[in-house]
Image (cartoon, helix red, strand yellow):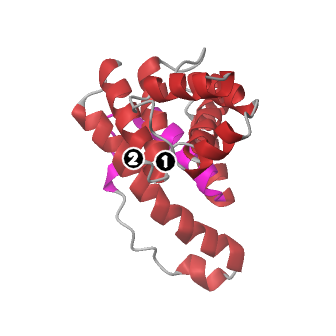
Amino acid sequence: MNETTETINELLQIIGLDVTYRNVSLSLLEKGESRYVRDLKLNFNSTLTSAHLTEKECALLGLSTAINNNNTPLISFYTSYAEKGGATAEEIAEAAGCASLLASNNIFYRFRHFTQKEKYSQIPARIRMQLMMKPVTGKEFFELMSLTISAVNGCEMCVNAHEDSLIKLGTTEERIFDAVRIGSLVTSFGKVVF
């Protein structure tokens, strides 16, 4: 067994998949004995901890991103990781709800931003957002999840709005940066394990 295969097997064990699991992306990396697999493992492991976020927050950010990306193996992993980190069923549900709500918001507000027509800004959005009003994870963390999903989905208007809200709430730029970093790395890992 070569080093690439060993690293792939270690990654699969970490996320709870059988070491025989392979998909097209993993097989290509394995066949080419890609050095990238080591980076992938280190990057994935760095989604689990942060100097600026709790373990539970890392898990909920990972979960919300995995749900946003419709990645079943990572949804299972981060749900379990969040539970082990003390997340309640309500907090886990909120991470799922945030991914869904932000998917609609990111499409809608990107449309408004892309067209740059004043008329579209005057028409009511008619998107229910009660989840944002009194989040069980707290206003600051819900904004952090919202920013992360908006960054993953590429909505400039939403990213700027959520980042501004976070700064006004007193969130540090390091905390914001780490949240988005986790979202980017979960998305990256999901291109290989899905």
Image height of 87 relative to 131, above or below: above
Say what amino acid the circle numbered 2 marks. Answer: Thr
Look at 31% across and 34% down and name the residue there.
Answer: 91
Please tell me which residue lies in front, 9 or 162: 9
> Which dot marks residue 72?
2
Image height of 122 relative to 99, above or below: below
Element type at mark 1: loop
Report the Cα–Cα distance between label 2 and label 1: 7 Å
Look at 58% across and 76% down and name the residue there.
Answer: 121
10 Å neighbourhood of mark 2: few (<14), some, or many (≥20)?
A: few
In the rendered image, residue 23, in percent from the top left (x then y), is placed at 52, 48
Name the residue carrying label 1. 194
10 Å neighbourhood of mark 1: few (<14), some, or many (≥20)?
A: some
Look at 71% across and 27% down and name the residue there.
Answer: 39
Image height of 173 relative to 117, above or below: above
> Which dot marks residue 34?
none
In the rendered image, residue 144, in percent from the top left (x then y), is placed at 53, 38
Q: Is residue 126 visible?
A: yes
Q: Quadrant of the N terminus?
A: top right
- Tell me which segment is drawn in magenta: 130-155
